[in-house]
Every structure is written in C-alpha cells, then in structure tokens.
Amino acid sequence: MNNYTVKQCSDLLQTRKVSAVELAQDYLQAIAAGNEAINGYITLDKERTLAEAQAADARLQSGSGSLLTGVPMAYKDIFCQTGWKSACGSKMLDNFVSPYTATVVQNLLNEGMVTLGRTNMDEFAMGSTTETSFRGATRNPWNENHVPGGSSGGSAAVVAARLAPAALGSDTGGSIRQPASHCGITGIKPTYGIVSRFGVVAYASSFDQAGPMAQTAEDCAVLLNAMAGFDARDSTSLERAKEDYCRDLNRPLAGLKVGLPREYFGAGLAADVQQAISSMVAVLKAQGAQMVDVSLPQTELSIPAYYVLASAEASTNLSRYDGVRYGHRAAHFNNLDEMYSNTRTEGFGSEVKRRIMIGTYVLSHGYYDAYYLKAQKLRRLVANDFQAAFKACDVILAPVAPTAAPKLNSDINDPVQMYLSDIYTISVNLAGLPGITLPAGFSADGLPIGVQFIGNYFAEAKLLNAAHQIQQVSDWHRKMPGESVRA
C-alpha cells in the first residue's frame, strides 16, 4: 500500500529514487486492487495518467520541475478537465466530457501533477454522505458499512485508503471538512474567493469553494500554494497578493488564543466527539495555547438560512440542464415542455429535485421576502457573530459533525436529519471564512473523529500552522484503515 504523503512523494521524485511513471503505476495498481470495495473513483484513464507521468519525468529530468511535479492527484467529479468526463455524480451529465479545464485544476497541472482519476460525490454536491451519486454510494475505508461523509466523500475515501496522496474537493456547507473528519484525513476550506471557481460545476455560487484534502496540514499548505490566485474568468475571485501558506508552519503555538464556542458543546454532541475535542484541548494547552470562551448565538439559525439560500442558488444554477445544449435528454417527448420536464425528471435524483423545489419556492413571488431575503439577513448576523468572537481569540476550535460516520442508509431516507448534521460546518460557508479539519481521535467502534479550526478571513496560514504543530506531537493523522486504534 502506498502510504506516502504529498511531501514524501515529492522527496522521492526530487531525489530520483522513483520516477513519476513508477509512482503513477504503483497508485494505479493500488486502485485496481482496492477501489471496488469503496467505490471512491468513478472515472479512470490509465493511458492519460501515464502520459502525464511521462511528461512530468521529462520536466524533472530537465530541471524545470517544481515541488509538485510528478505527484499524483485525484479530482472530485465536479471539476472540469479537458477530455475527462465531469458528471457531478449525476445521470444528467453522465455523458458529458469537458472541453475545457477548471482554473484550479490547470494550476495543479501547470505544476506537473499527475491526474489519477475522478472521485465519487453526492449528486451535484447535494448531500452529506455520498449516497446520492448516480454511480452508487461510496463506502468508508475504515468500515465499509459506514458512509465516508459528503459531498466530497470519494475524495476523502481515496486519500484515507491510500489510493491517492491527495485529492481535490469542494466545500459548500462542509463538504471538504466533514468527509475529512469521517475518513481520518486533513482538509481545508479556504476563504471564499481565493481559489477560482471557474470550471467548477456550480451548486450554490456564493458558497462553493475548492480545497485540498490530504494526510497532513503540510500537504494541504503546499497544495494551496499552487491552487490559490486571482482568476479574471471568475467574477467572485479576489485580486490580492500571492501568499506562501507554508510560511508559518513551524511557528510555536505559545500564546495562541483558541476560542471554544459554547453553542457547539450542548445537547446532540456525541460523547466520543466531545472526548476528541477534550484531547485536542489538552494538546493545545501543552503547546502553550490559551483557551477562551466565545459565543456564536446565531448557530441554530444557520441551518434554515443555509438551506434556503443554497437551495435558491441551486434552483437557478441547475436550470441550465434542460436537454437542449448538453447532458442527458429524454428519449420520448411530444413538445418542448415535455422535453424539459421528462429530461429533468429522468436526469436528476431525488435529493437534487428536493432542493430545486425548495429553491424555486423561496424565490417565487410572494415568498421571496419571507424566506430568501430574511435568510440573507441571517447570513449577515452569522458573519457578525464570528467577527465578534475573533476579537477575543485567534482561531476557533469546534466539532465537525455531531457523531462519527453514520451507517449506510441511516440518514439518506431522513433528509432533515442529514441537514441537521451540518450544524457545525455551514456557518463557516455562510460567513465565507476558512476552516480546516484534522484527525483528533476515534469512536468506540474505531471510526475516525476530526475537529476543525475556524479562522478569520485570509487566516489560512494561521490555521495550517495550528494543525501542523498539532500533527508534530500527535499521531491521529498517521493511522490507516485496518490498523488497531483506541478511542
């Protein structure tokens, strides 16, 4: 099994102890042996992967390679890449081969990274378990009877199963951080606007943000360096100076003020998740960090605000899938209206239809002010809560999910329960803040439990510093599926 971090892959390639082709072949062999059990990858192209690896070897041989040249990478099915199918886990796009490449993917390709394949996801990123995919559910590598989280569950699963050193995910309401927690890996959702959304199939445009998922915070920092940057093709992209997200990795945590929001530690939080938080607090205190009580009073209102706004944006964004231009088209219809109706009925799954219906309703005449406009006002209150909290602390420590990964089929038939499980993650997206998840322990039945650090705008380096320093003195992130672990 290829238990390599991104940094270790880079070191092997830079010292020529292994070639990019050999490394790609090793991962392709691991995928062939291990993917069927978890259904993490849904599209592979061995010839393209090896061709990219050969090109990476040529760059390394010529001395023009970078730190990431030749390192394998997996991509969530939501990212467009020329010549690859980008189906978003949906029947609607299951025949769509992208004619262009997302900027964030192109940035990584420019570094010479090698594409391993596309990973499974909840259909159009709508879900928290990766069970709504047209290509079937993904299973958690730690226990195949449990979900990996979602919607970036495929990306989290392949990294946890060591079928890729890193993967790209997208986070609309926690879709990087929550599956990273359930699969025992590290994942960062950057500040909204610092990573281009061009070529990322839209779910909710004012929430979606791409981010790296890997074994370590150091890997995430290296990848974010390559990913981030202004893109004129994305109207939400922020034009700001380039940062080095690795710059503070080795800074001691002495004096760091860590906020503990009282609203996050009440009823509904499982005892083993609470224990993981306590373990993390102990590690932080040992490193010289100071705990501070803070309040985020609008936490409970974040769920209705998020699902009103995200569904409204989904209704608008998914209106383009009508059977006219690209994607699925119904085979039988008598007129244009029937073509639209039949195409969308056949092409979308039940969760996507549910959110389209909710979104269309809240945007309709007579309900816009009562629901959509009020939710926008709540969004501002949520953001204000965070700004008040950051006056007292540098970062916020919080749970990622109320429990460890649930069993397959336990939440998919209860959408309200699934929505409630996002209570600790969606506020970050409402406010557009950065957040990072890292492993912090295990449940009584051996499932990973993660915690998240939340930072103020553009505080990625600070979050990565905290996570990296913790990973220097703990080993939760080094554990692999199949190993014996203790709660």
Image (cartoon, rainbow, N blue to C red):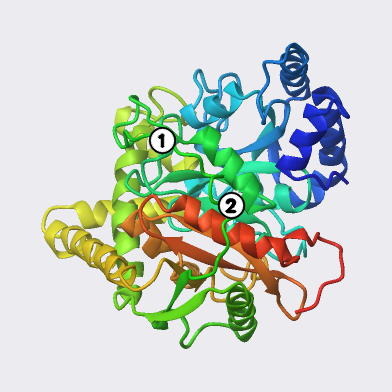
Report helix, strand or loop for mark 2.
loop
Q: Amino acid at mark 2?
A: Leu
Q: Residue at x 34, y 43 (%)?
A: 205
Q: Residue at x 51, y 54 (%)?
A: 175
The image quarter containing residue 375 is bottom left
Among the two numbered marks 2 and 1 on one chain, the one whose residue lies closer to the N terminus: 1
Q: Amino acid at mark 1?
A: Arg
Could you say where residue 263 lies in the image, as x and y percent from the top left?
39, 81
Q: Is residue 234 above or below residue 437?
A: above
Mark identifier at residue 186: none
Could you say where residue 331 lies in the image, as x and y percent from the top left?
49, 28
* Residue underneath mark 1: 197
Could you say where residue 382 lies in the image, as x and y percent from the top left?
28, 67
In 3D space, how far apart are the residues under numbered discs 2 and 1 (Cα atoms)? 27 Å
Nearer to the camera, 207 or 196:
196
Nearer to the camera, 314 or 434:
434
* Residue underneath mark 2: 249
Residue 397 vs residue 484: left or right? left
Neighbour tally class for label 1: few under 14, some 14-19, many 20 plus, Cα within 10 Å: many
Q: Residue at x 23, y 67 (%)?
A: 381
Residue 204 vs residue 110: left or right? left
Q: Is residue 71 above or below residue 83?
A: below
Q: How many marks?
A: 2
